[in-house]
Structure formats: structure tokens, C-alpha cells
Image (cartoon, grey):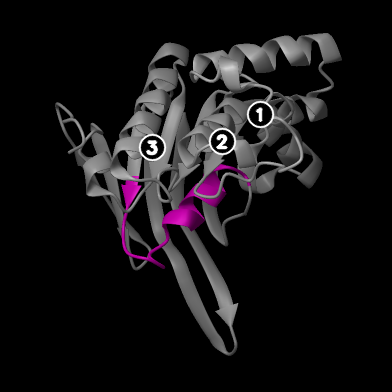
Amino acid sequence: MYALTDVSKTYRRGKATLAALDRVSLTIPAGSRLVVQGPTGGGKSTLLQLLGGLDRPTSGTVMLDGEDLGGLSEAKLTRLRAQRIGFVFQGFHLIPTLTAQENVETALVPLRVRPAERRARAAEALASVGLAERAGHIPGELSGGQQQRVAIARALVKRPEVLLADEPTGNLDETTRDEVMEVLETQWREHGLTFVLVTHDSGIARRAERVARIAKGRITVTERRTATPAG
């Protein structure tokens, strides 16, 4: 479970100090889904970076299962990200000269997984997102939706506890958006992931039971009893 207490994040821009997050307190139960919305510059991506250990708060604490992420050394943070957190971004960040299979395997290299197991796990991850038959294709031979599914497989192949997604459908058309969201939601349900997704898309937000809206660094959480399909 994530527990954020009085988290602020400020940046210096010239002589000015900008508050990306302002005394945010938030809990994200293990296995739950949270969709984060808000205007550009409102603090959405900053929140995701703090949850992923990619940045540290200026003040306050970001706890993951009792560990203070802001207090960990860089080596421990790097290990935690490699082992426990999967990331999916708007840009697919695939290596253009590697096949889909090889791109997925790259997530297992830092974990020192043996080559035979890497190959087997990558093939399994690609099959889970419906791309078993595309394993030998390089990114340039895949559609945008297929490339994003490769990126999802890469995030999930290490079997993380947390999945953080920053505008994962931002570059996709509506039909492909829905297909990618179905893949993400299926993986969340089947693997019991803690799933945090940043989006501008209100259609995606309507699918979630819990939505956090961030504006000017402050956060408001809305709970819903039921979610609705995108459309």
C-alpha cells in the first residue's frame, strides 16, 4: 500500500519557487486502481514520479509497504524500481533495432534472469497481451497500439507489484485506446496489481472506481461505487 503524508514538491525556476505538489496526503490500497486527472502542469506526472521512486519529495513522506521511498539510497531505489514497479509511458520507448521479444527481455537483464528463463517469460508476457505472433517483429513493423502492448508486456514481465502508467493511450485513436485499456485492466485484475494511471481522457476516468484530480498541486479524490465503460 502507498501512503503519502503532507507531500510537497517544489522546483526552482529562476528566482521563483514553483509548487508541483502542495501538502498532498493520499492512500492507495494494495491491488486497487487510481486514475489521476488534472490540467497540464497541475502535478500529475510529478505524483507518478514520486510513486515510482523517480524523484523525491521536498517535504513529507511517500511510503510503499512501510518503506520511505524518499529516504532510500539511489542503489536501493534502483533495485526497488527494477523488482517491484512497472512503468508504461505515452511514448513507447522501445529500442528500434530489437524485436518485440528482445525489447521485453530487456526488463529482466538488471534482475540477472538467466537467458532461457528471460526468453520464456518474455514470450509469456507477449502472449498475455495478444502479441505472441508478433514476437519477432521490430517496432517499425508494428502499429502504435501493438507497440504500446509490447511496452505493457515489458513492464509486466518482471512480475511487479505496482503498475504506473503516464498517458499510456495519449498517442492512440479511440478504438486502439479501448483495446489497450482492456489489456491494462485485464492485467490489473489477473495479477492483483496496484495500478495508478495518469490521463487527460475523461472516457478512461469513467472506467475507474477512484479518481484523483490534481490542480495547482492540491488533490481531491472521488470514490465511485461502479465504473462505466469508455465511450
Q: Secondary structure at mark 2?
A: loop
Q: Earlier in the sequence, mark 3 or mark 2?
A: 3
Residue toward you, 142 or 87: 142
- Find the distance from the CA under tag 3 to the CA under tag 2: 38 Å
**Would residue 143 appear left or right of 14 to someone viewing this image?**
left
Disc number placed over residue 27 in the picture, else none:
3
Specify start and end residues of the magenta stretch as a single range: 36-53
- Find the distance from the CA under tag 1 to the CA under tag 3: 41 Å
Discs 1/3, front: 1
Residue at the bottom extreme, as displayed: 15
Discs 3/2, front: 2
| Location of residue 33 in the rendering, given as x and y in whole percent from the top left corner | 35, 30
Residue 117: image quadrant is top right
Q: Residue at x 70, y 32 (%)?
A: 103
In contact (CB < 8 Å): disc 2 and disc 1: yes
Q: Residues within 10 Å of mark 2 (few under 14, many from 20)?
A: some
Q: Which residue is mark 1?
A: 137
- Find the distance from the CA under tag 2 to the CA under tag 1: 7 Å
Q: Secondary structure at mark 3?
A: strand
Q: Amino acid at mark 3?
A: Thr
